Amino acid sequence: MLIKTTKKLIGYAGSVDYAIEWPEHKILGWALILHPHPLYGGNRNNKVITTISRECLRQGIVAIRPNFRGVGDSDGFFDNGVGETHDMSALMHQIIDVYPELSELPCFLAGFSFGSAVAAQLYSKLYDENKSANIRCLMLIGSAVQRFQFSEIHLPNKTIIIHGETDEIVPFDEMLDWARPKSIPIIMIPSCSHFFHGKLLLLREMVSIYLKSSII
């Protein structure tokens, strides 16, 4: 049986509310999955976030879904990605302390929309601190990294963007202009909106393929 618990750790603005789910078979890694914009209804139960989480669990990866500051039971107020990045950095360090069985396992970062920007900045922060070695891959879903960038971006070799062709929030061409000079591989889902309406199964298949290639 899958085990799901809701707990709190401490971020820079106070407590961070998160859900953690454990797979029913051998644990191969853990994933931090970050939700879309808090001021537009984004939270850890967003359907894109839960779709990614379910696929992680199916592949033996512990799924951790925090609520950003000001969302759910997380303290603080929206900080345009800056405070959220620092909160997630603090969360990651505490996760290893609270769940030492994860410390030697690979980590997978994923973010949707605003969450993709926090995920990319989080990796960059850990990279600058020489603490990114265990991060196996970065998945940017409906990427909005360029809209919330506040410092230099570093990306792991295994970075992928999954984006809808008809994304009405972050147009495909806008995302491509940011990704092109960085040579980031892109999976474009035809006739797909920002929220992957009617395309969640296809999104899950793409996430599945990328996770499998990253676990090896």
Image (cartoon, helix red, strand yellow):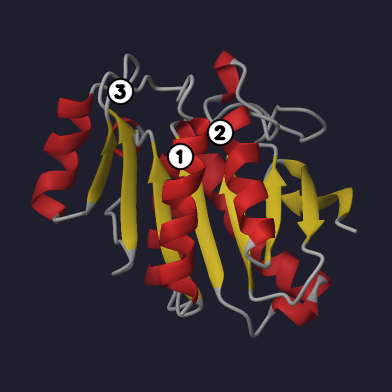
Q: Secondary structure at mark 3?
A: loop
| Marks 1 & 2, CB-CB < 8 Å contact | yes
Looking at the rendered structure, the kind of residue marked 2 is Val
* Cα distance between the residues tagged 1 and 2: 8 Å
Q: Position of residue 144 (x, y in %)?
A: 34, 33
In three-dimensional space, the C-alpha distance between marks 1 and 3, rounded to whole angstroms, equals 17 Å
Secondary element at image label 2: helix
Residue 105 found in image quarter: bottom right
Question: Where does label 1 land, which residue?
Answer: 203
Q: Is residue 161 visible?
A: yes
Task: Please tell me how crowded label 1 is: few (under 14), some (14-19), or many (20+) other residues with Cα within 10 Å.
Answer: many
Residue 97 versus residue 177 in the image, above or below:
below
Amino acid on which disc 3 is placed: Val
- Can you say whether 168 is above or below 19 in the image? above
Residue under pointer 3: 170
Relative horizontal placement of residue 83, taking residue 77 as reference (left or right): left
Residue 196 falls in image quadrant: top left
Residue that numbered label 2 is attached to: 48
Label 1 or label 3, whichever lies nearer to me, is 1
How far apart in space, not on screen, are marks 2 and 3 (Cα)?
A: 16 Å
**Dot 2, how many residues are within 10 Å of its Cα: few (below 14), some (14-19), or many (20+)?**
many
At x 24% / y 47%, what residue is drawn?
186
